[in-house]
């Protein structure tokens, strides 16, 4: 990464964004008719697909049944074509296992699991193209898919990342910025209550700078929320219009 200027003197990043600006987000809900809920999202060049099944009866071992709430099962994977390197094992590697656990923790904090005792909710997320912010993009895709499945949540879960380059906090890092080796924070937030569902820091950062980086990530999560809410409203209008058309047919 030597010699690459991540932030220009005018305050612009490699891709032309300002420090606190998100990459462009595009999303669709209800992309798989066979699933209970599904969504596809693009954040910049990072693309993810989320599919939700359930709530349904526990499958396999009954030992994991929870009598007072639903079990949330999350699986993360990367398509073999998602990066420039061809991966032989898109499933089962350490990163996928770690990501699956992070997603499980995130959605256990948001889904009203107590409404579905002795049942299971499955969330499958796949990265189709990776260009930074994989975990965050997956959280945002899964949030839309859970809403599409009609599963009640305390709030949306919105995720974004933040870094710290040349004394400036940067929001929603791209792959180039993540690879630069600076501190990198991932945050999943319930925006209305400002409750943190998950926070991860990948390297050391002086505590004097932590609050500014946290604020940048938190603001980015709220910006993501505004986009996701628009996607949900547009989807509801489309579905209502379709149902209305069928009712008059």
Image (cartoon, grey):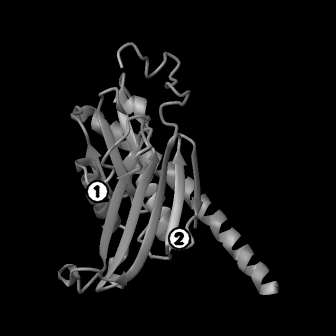
175 lies above or below 242: above
Please state if 97 lies on the left or on the right of 160 as rendered: left
28 lies above or below 129: below
Please state if 23 lies on the left or on the right of 167 as rendered: right
Which quadrant of the view contains residue 84?
A: top left
The image position of residue 109, as x and y in percent, is 32, 66
- Classed neighbour count for the residue bearing mark 1: other residues with Cα under 10 Å, few (<14), some (14–19), many (≥20): many
- Identify the image quadrant of the C terminus: bottom right
Residue at disc 1, secondary structure: helix
Q: Residue at x 31, y 69 (%)?
A: 73
Is any part of residue 109 visible from this angle? no
The image position of residue 90, as x and y in percent, is 33, 50
Q: Residue at x 38, y 56 (%)?
A: 189
- Identify the image quadrant of the N terminus: top left
Q: Residue at x 22, y 31 (%)?
A: 206
* Residue contact at pointers 2 and 1, CB within 8 angstroms: no
Please name whichever residue, 182 or 245, is drawn nearer the observer in this view of the structure: 245
Mark 2 — residue? 148
The label on residue 102 is 1
Residue at disc 2, secondary structure: helix
Please state if 180 lies on the left or on the right of 41 as rendered: left
Which quadrant of the view contains residue 66?
A: bottom left
The image position of residue 157, as x and y in percent, is 42, 60
Q: CA distance from mark 2 to mark 1?
A: 21 Å
94 lies above or below 19: below
- Classed neighbour count for the residue bearing mark 2: other residues with Cα under 10 Å, few (<14), some (14–19), many (≥20): many
The image position of residue 40, as x and y in percent, is 53, 57
Please name whichever residue, 222 or 143, is drawn nearer the observer in this view of the structure: 143
Please name whichever residue, 213 or 236, is drawn nearer the observer in this view of the structure: 236
Given the current orientation, which residue lies at the most extreme top position? Answer: 3
Is any part of residue 29 visible from this angle? yes
Please name whichever residue, 50 or 60, is drawn nearer the observer in this view of the structure: 60
């Amino acid at each position: 990464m030597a010699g690459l200027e991540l932030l220009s003197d005018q305050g612009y990043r490699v891709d032309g964004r300002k420090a606190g600006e998100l990459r462009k987000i595009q999303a669709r809900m209800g992309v798989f008719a066979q699933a209970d809920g599904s969504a596809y999202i693009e954040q910049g060049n990072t693309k993810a697909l989320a599919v939700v099944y359930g709530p349904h009866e526990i499958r396999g071992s009954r030992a994991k049944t929870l009598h007072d709430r639903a079990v949330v099962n999350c699986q993360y994977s990367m398509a073999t074509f998602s990066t420039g390197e061809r991966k032989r094992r898109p499933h089962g590697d350490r990163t996928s296992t770690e990501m699956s656990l992070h997603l499980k923790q995130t959605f256990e904090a948001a889904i009203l699991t107590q409404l579905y005792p002795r049942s299971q909710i499955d969330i499958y997320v796949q990265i189709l193209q990776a260009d930074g912010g994989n975990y965050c993009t997956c959280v945002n895709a899964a949030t839309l898919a859970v809403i599409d499945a009609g599963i009640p949540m305390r709030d949306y879960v919105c995720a974004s990342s933040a870094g710290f380059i040349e004394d400036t906090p940067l929001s929603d890092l791209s792959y180039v910025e993540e690879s630069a080796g600076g501190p990198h924070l991932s945050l999943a937030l319930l925006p209305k209550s400002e409750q943190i569902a998950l926070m991860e820091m990948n390297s050391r950062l002086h505590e004097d700078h932590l609050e500014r980086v946290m604020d940048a990530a938190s603001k980015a999560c709220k910006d993501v929320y505004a986009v996701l809410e628009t996607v949900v409203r547009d989807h509801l209008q489309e579905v209502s219009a379709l149902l209305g058309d069928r009712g008059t047919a």
